[in-house]
Image (cartoon, rainbow, N blue to C red):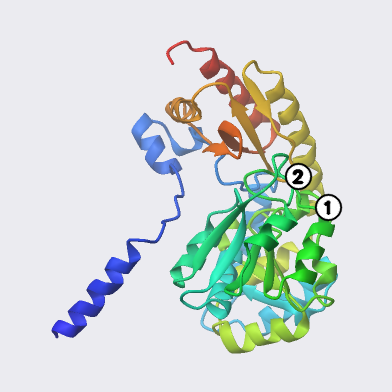
Amino acid sequence: MKNKKRMIRNVLNEARRLISYDVGETVEKLAQRLNKKPPEILKLNSNENFFIPLEFLRSILEEVVEEADPRIYPRDEIRDLKRKYGEYVGVSPRQIVIGTGSDQLIDLTCRIFLRRGDEALAISPTFSIYKRCVEIQGAFYKPVPLRKDFSLDVESLMNASSSKTRIIFLCSPNNPTANRLERRGIIQLAERFEGLVAVDEAYIDFSEGSLIDLTEEFENLIIFRTFSKVFGLAGLRIGCAIANTELAKTIDEKFQMPYSVSLIAVKAALKILEYPEAIRSAIHNVKKERERLIRELNRVNGVKAFNSETNFVLFQVNRSSKSIYRKLLERGVIIRNIGRVLENENCLRVTVAPAQMMNRFLSILKETLNQNDY
């Protein structure tokens, strides 16, 4: 009995070194604190896609629920989703692994390739989930800074790698810097690095230059995609990994859990792929509003907005970003306080949303910046 207790205590002690993923302020808690109704809160902190109409998504879910038999595990539906998504992005369905969001597949990749004492590299700054997944495995996470202009530094990554390095994580377009990494640089890494080059393309639909076409050429390249961003299905948690046929088959058959994705999520993903025009329209509107938002932010005194190839914008303020973040919260606006990004202090990140939401955000931001109580 004492040994069992000691084992549990060891696990709990080991867990203290791990980071937790901060989801930020929630709509419900903030609304309660401000004595507001949840719809009055402006949620712009998680890069969700508000350009896909809610009524449209609810109509899809109604059809899915009507068609689905929740007593039966999803089998043919996953096969059908691989085929249909493969057609959408231009790869063989045999190259696709379906998972519960891309996060689950990133975690699965770490469990496959990393052992205690191994290393994984990642660009810095970037999405924090890579560090979390690496350290859960007992491996070492080594961040390698991007260049000052947020571009990829291939030589620094290669110099930082060692015989213990198993994975290099890249996010392109990157979160939070919002820029796409140079294709040639990623190819060079895939050619020179002996381990796995893992590229997170969660935001690629709002940009150009996917590397999916290279997955059969490079056996050490894996691409992560998600239905959370461009398709507006963040709440259903579904994503995929794309790799060469042999690697994808091995991950799917030997490591991925059977029935890892809910039937409703799979059928909803299938259904939304039947409406490519709606998706193209949403992408167009995101890009249009993104450019307007950047333009308007750069007109605000004390604000510098960076270029973006995503559905969010990183911007810098000339005072404490933490203070601005808190004051916006008090006005019912939730964005993300990023802080320092390489040499840029006091950075914040805001989701690109339809014009009515952006106008409200811009108005409240200007009022907040004009206050003198700092």
Q: Is residue 302 above or below residue 212?
A: above
Provide residue 173's location: percent of width, then percent of height: 72, 51
Left or right, 113 with reference to 323: right
Q: Is residue 100 visible?
A: no
Q: Is residue 131 visible?
A: yes
Instruction: Using the rendered view, name the quadrant where residue 177 is placed.
Output: top right
Tell which of 240 and 338 is nearer to you: 338
Instruction: Tell me the SS state at disc 2.
Output: loop
Tell which of 283 and 54 is nearer to you: 283
Residue under label 2, please give it: 309
Q: Amino acid at mark 1?
A: Glu
Q: Residue at x 20, y 78 (%)?
A: 6
Residue farthest to the top, as pictured: 372
Q: Residue at x 70, y 68 (%)?
A: 197
CB-based contact (under 8 Å), mark 1 and mark 2: yes
Instruction: Using the rendered view, name the quadrant where residue 191 is placed.
Output: bottom right
Instruction: Tell me the SS state at disc 1.
Output: loop
For the residues labelled 1 and 2, the Cα–Cα distance comes to 8 Å
Q: Residue at x 37, y 30 (%)?
A: 34
Left or right, 152 with reference to 88: left
Local crowd at mark 2 within 10 Å, few (<14), some, or many (≥20)? many
The label on residue 208 is 1
Provide residue 117's location: percent of width, then percent of height: 47, 74
Provide residue 303's location: percent of width, then percent of height: 64, 22
